[in-house]
């Protein structure tokens, strides 16, 4: 071995080969994939460069590194140290041919004697002068991409984050600050990519490999590391590792507590971004309503009180989206008698796509008991059954009382809210809260009985009559006529018939212009009547910030205009032959026919009442919306907020606290600005996954983003969801994400992620409906059955799988959807 040139793998100290070379030798001996190198020691250089002997020796060693080109990089004594990295102070020379290397090495050597290095050391209070650096001669990596990975966030100081910067080709332009690369932030515990690029340079496998490398390097070092890397194909090279010298936050104490957030069901009610005001209102409603439910079925006040944290935390707002705190839903259900024996059925009732992880589920609720425990549990179940039977028997009266309370609260004309002072508006909200939200008995009882009746009647007919029984069940649930959810479509169709006689007005309405509606008095009256009853039945109607149809009737205008084109453009579902009825299905079995008629009649009424009560909920939310808008106007007039619409960026307690005196902050304007900025940032990110598993404090998982899903070219041509309204249609598919911005031509097939009652204007023009989310009792399923159009729900990934504008075939009975038609 020459004393002047050190080969790779010799465990020499930094005093001999400099900090960088010493670190690379250490990492190579640990098995990390470091490109082969040799080190030219500082005393190999004279005032004019290398001697002829050293040059020959260097060239002789190059074949051991592999074919060129090569890089010449510095390795000074204190370079890459624990306190001071000297980053960017020394020269690196890349892409060198063998004959050019001696001169390149000398240039790197001289860079260590530059005035800039002296100034750097002086600025950091380092004593003495830096000795000239050794020079690393290394084979160049043919990098498809390269960059840096920090095992802690050097900006925020967080140690639970990995920060990756990547650039195409070699990383010198990134490290030298000539170009900006892509940045990825990774949760080091879960491996989830928290921040990424729109068209990422790094694949998921690349990020996984870099995360693994970074944590292994850190574990073999004395602390968080700043690591340079490069991919040559799929091979990951470690180019350099040095300590992060910027101050970091203390390391957090490990917390393995698991929380599961899931939006499988609630996304139908609260899709997309949800304002702080809406979320806080919903959180309060859920807490009060489900306390009332468990109380109704016999759970004691002491038990309810001891589980206050469960009821107060049934929802979560993650990156602006609403989720269930799934563990707390299970804890609430576990208070019900018979939970251990009926867990699977209760999961089905909740509508979640997958059960709770065993790790969490095993600690919730008791196991099936035996002996005296089983007797006691049976008594509790029997008591709950009797209470529910009592509530079922008096349901009509309960509904009448609820309706009277609701009508009394909403009796005051809505426009009077605009003339009330803030104190009166707060008192009006408290009245709604006490009269309705705290006494949500009729919807609660009917919803529970509806789920039980629908499921039981469907199971009964399937058991007794197989597929014909299921067809009969669907058929009987169609065409009830008195479901209020179908009335908007019927009214829109009727207005379309009137408008069809006035082509010029139809053209205006198609453009969203209703200025000449008064020229057709009959249509004008019908539209005003519609708005008087259904203006709150807008898209995303449970969001307080949603724009109602009386404020923006354009979606209604366009729906009427589309209906006016006539039914001849709508593909008709073929006649369903041999439609089963009770007499034919149960011919010769009068007892079964009688039982089936009773059970189906009960289920049908519960479905009807469920939809009608949900409309009453819409009215209540509509009144709350107008009340808070009135408060927003007054807050703006008093200078508390900059715009009346900013009221939606405050929470209900903050709004009431500012009026009633229990508020904490008087600077409401700053609060709204902060939250507007947060929601604006969240809007730029894709929706988090449907289910999120978070370890430790829940806030650690509150910003979870996933890469936008891309349509796969090799997907199957057929998929099956849940068929819930019979009929077959072949037509053009229209993928609709936001019905306020996108439209559906009459006769097209609606493809959506989820729907709500505000989509009725779109339903009116659809020949069939395909929805990613939902169940047989979803609003889209019920309205489709009322309108008599095929409907398939629960077809996951439909908006990605189906291409906008392609022709597809939908079978609403079997749930089959076929592309490529």
Image (tube, grey):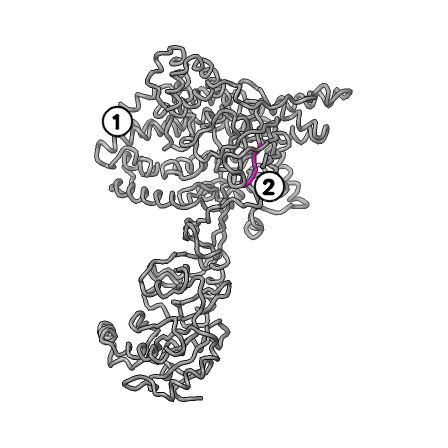
| 67 w.r.t. 210: above or below | below
Vertical order, 193 against 365 (above or below): below
Asked which secondary structure carries label 1, the reply is: loop
* Quadrant where the image shows the C terminus: top right
Residue 667 visible to an observer of this rendering = yes
* The magenta stretch spans residue 350: no
- Residue 377's spot in the image, x, y percent? 63, 40
Return the residue at label 2.
339
Compared with residue 401, is residue 816 higher up or lower down, i.e. above or below? Answer: below
Q: x, y percentage for residue 31?
A: 50, 74
Residue at x-position 54% and y-position 43%: 330
> Magenta residues, as a range?
792-798
Q: Secondary structure at mark 2?
A: loop
Callout 2–callout 1 Cβ contact below 8 Å: no
Q: Point out the tag, 2 or 1, that comes first from the N-terminus.
A: 2
Q: Which numbered disc covers residue 386? A: none
* Marks 2, 1: nearer the viewer: 1
Q: Quadrant of the N terminus?
A: bottom left
Question: Which residue is disc 1 drawn over?
Answer: 421
Say whether residue 620 is left or right of residue 120: right
- Residue 496 in picture, x, y percent from top left: 45, 17
How crowded pointer 2 is (Cα within 10 Å; few <14, some 14-19, many 20+) is rated as many
Direction top: furthest residue: 521
């Amino acid at each position: 071995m020459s004393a002047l040139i050190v080969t790779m793998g010799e465990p020499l100290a930094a005093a001999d080969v400099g900090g960088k070379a010493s670190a690379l030798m250490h990492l190579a001996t640990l098995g990390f994939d470091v490109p082969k190198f040799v080190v030219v020691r500082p005393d190999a250089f004279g005032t004019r460069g290398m001697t002829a002997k050293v040059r020959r020796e260097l060239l002789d060693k190059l074949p051991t590194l592999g074919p060129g080109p090569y890089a010449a990089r510095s390795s000074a004594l204190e370079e890459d140290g624990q306190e001071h990295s000297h980053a960017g102070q020394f020269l690196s020379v890349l892409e060198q041919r063998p004959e050019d290397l001696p001169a390149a090495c000398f240039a790197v050597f001289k860079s260590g004697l530059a005035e800039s290095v002296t100034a750097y050391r002086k600025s950091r209070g380092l004593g003495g002068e830096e000795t000239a650096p050794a020079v690393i001669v290394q084979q160049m990596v043919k990098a498809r991409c390269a960059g840096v990975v920090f095992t802690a966030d050097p900006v925020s100081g967080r140690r639970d984050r990995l920060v990756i910067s990547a650039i195409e080709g070699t990383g010198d332009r990134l490290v030298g600050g000539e170009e900006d690369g892509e940045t990825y932030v990774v949760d080091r515990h879960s491996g989830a990519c928290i921040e990424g690029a729109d068209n990422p340079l790094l694949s998921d496998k690349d990020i996984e490999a870099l995360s693994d490398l970074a944590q292994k390097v850190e574990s073999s070092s004395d602390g968080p590391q700043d690591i340079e890397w490069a991919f040559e194909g799929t091979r990951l090279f470690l180019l350099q590792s040095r300590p992060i010298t910027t101050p970091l936050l203390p390391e957090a104490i490990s917390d393995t507590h698991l929380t599961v957030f899931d939006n499988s069901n609630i996304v139908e009610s609260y899709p997309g971004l949800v304002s702080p005001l809406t979320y806080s209102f919903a959180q309060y409603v859920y807490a009060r309503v489900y306390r009332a439910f468990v109380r109704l079925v016999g759970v004691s006040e002491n038990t309810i009180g001891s589980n206050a944290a469960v009821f107060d935390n049934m929802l979560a707002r993650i990156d602006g989206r609403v989720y269930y705190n799934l563990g707390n839903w299970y804890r609430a259900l576990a208070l019900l008698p018979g939970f251990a024996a009926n867990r699977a059925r209760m999961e089905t009732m909740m509508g979640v796509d997958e059960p709770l992880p065993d790790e969490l589920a095993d600690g919730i609720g008791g196991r099936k008991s035996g002996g005296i425990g089983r007797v006691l549990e049976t008594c509790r179940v029997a008591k709950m059954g009797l209470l529910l039977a009592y509530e079922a028997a008096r349901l009509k009266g309960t509904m009448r009382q609820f309706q009277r309370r609701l009508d009394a609260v909403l009796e005051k004309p809505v426009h009077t809210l605009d003339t009330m002072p803030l104190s009166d508006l707060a008192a009006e909200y408290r009245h709604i809260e006490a009269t309705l939200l705290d006494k949500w008995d009729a919807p609660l009882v009917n919803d529970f009985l509806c789920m039980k009746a629908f499921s039981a009647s469907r199971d009964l007919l399937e058991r007794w009559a197989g597929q014909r029984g299921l067809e009969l069940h669907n058929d009987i649930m169609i065409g009830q006529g008195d479901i209020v959810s179908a009335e908007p479509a019927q009214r829109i169709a009727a207005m379309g018939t009137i408008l069809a006689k006035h082509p010029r007005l139809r053209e205006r309405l198609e453009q969203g212009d209703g200025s000449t509606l008064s020229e057709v008095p009959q249509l004008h009256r019908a539209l005003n009547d519609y708005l008087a009853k259904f203006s709150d039945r807008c898209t995303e109607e449970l969001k307080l910030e949603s724009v109602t149809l009386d404020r923006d009737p354009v979606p209604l205008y366009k729906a009427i205009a589309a209906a006016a084109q006539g039914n001849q453009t709508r593909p008709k579902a073929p006649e369903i032959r041999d439609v089963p009825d009770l007499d034919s299905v149960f011919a010769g079995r009068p007892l079964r026919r009688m039982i089936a008629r009773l059970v189906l009649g009960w289920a049908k009424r519960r479905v009807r009442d469920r939809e009608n009560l949900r409309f009453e909920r819409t009215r209540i939310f509509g009144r709350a919306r107008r009340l808070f808008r009135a408060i927003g106007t007054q807050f703006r007039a008093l200078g508390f907020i900059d715009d009346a619409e900013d009221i939606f960026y405050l929470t209900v307690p903050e709004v009431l606290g500012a009026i009633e005196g229990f508020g904490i902050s008087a600077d409401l304007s700053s609060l709204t600005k902060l939250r507007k900025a947060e929601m604006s940032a969240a809007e730029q990110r894709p929706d988090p996954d449907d289910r999120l598993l978070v370890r430790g404090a829940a806030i650690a998982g509150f910003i979870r983003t996933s890469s936008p899903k891309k349509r796969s070219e090799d997907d199957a041509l057929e998929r099956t969801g849940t068929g819930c309204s019979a009929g077959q249609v072949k037509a053009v598919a229209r993928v609709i994400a936001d019905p306020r911005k996108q439209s559906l031509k009459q006769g097209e097939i609606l493809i959506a992620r989820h729907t709500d009652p505000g989509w009725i204007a779109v339903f009116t023009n659809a020949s069939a409906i395909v929805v990613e989310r939902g169940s047989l009792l979803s609003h889209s399923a019920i309205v489709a059955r009322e309108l008599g159009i095929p409907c398939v729900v629960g077809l996951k990934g439909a908006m990605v799988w189906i291409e906008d504008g392609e022709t597809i075939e939908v079978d609403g009975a079997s749930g089959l959807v076929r592309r490529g038609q």
